[in-house]
Image (spheres, rainbow, N blue to C red):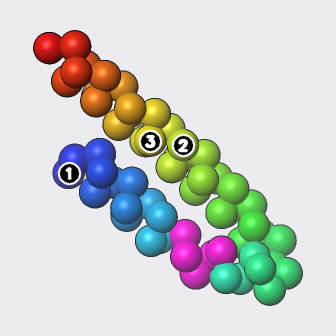
């Protein structure tokens, strides 16, 4: 699986928890924050990959 697919999967997987968190579910909010940290890390990996491609 490439990084962009992984990023998309992470975002889609937290959609239900996001909606629950908007409704006031604190545990869902915690799960969303963790998922967003994972999204940030994968996005950073994609950025590094693109920089390596540019430098080649």
Front residue (pair 40, 54): 54
Element type at marker 1? loop
Name the residue tied to disc 1. 1
Q: Are marks 2 and 3 in contact (CB under 8 Å)?
A: yes
> Does the segment drawn in magenta span residue 26?
no
Q: Does residue 52 appear left or right of residue 45 in this picture?
A: left
Q: Are marks 1 and 2 in contact (CB under 8 Å)?
A: no
Name the residue tied to disc 3. 43
The quarter of the picture where the C terminus appears is top left
Q: Is residue 16 above or below residue 47?
A: below
Q: Is residue 48 above or below residue 22?
A: above
Name the residue tied to disc 2. 40
Q: Does residue 8 appear left or right of residue 17 in this picture?
A: left
Task: Mark 1: give few (<14), some (14-19) or many (20+) Cα within 10 Å.
Answer: few
The image quarter containing residue 35 is: bottom right
Q: Mark 1 or mark 2, which has the lower sequence index? A: 1
Task: Mark 2: give few (<14), some (14-19) or many (20+) Cα within 10 Å.
Answer: few
Q: Mark 1 or mark 3, which has the lower sequence index? A: 1
């Amino acid at each position: 699986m490439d990084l962009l697919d992984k990023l998309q999967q992470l975002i889609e997987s937290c959609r239900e928890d996001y909606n629950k968190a908007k409704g006031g579910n604190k545990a869902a909010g915690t799960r969303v924050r963790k998922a967003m940290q994972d999204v940030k890390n994968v996005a950073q990996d994609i950025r590094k990959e693109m920089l390596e491609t540019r430098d080649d």
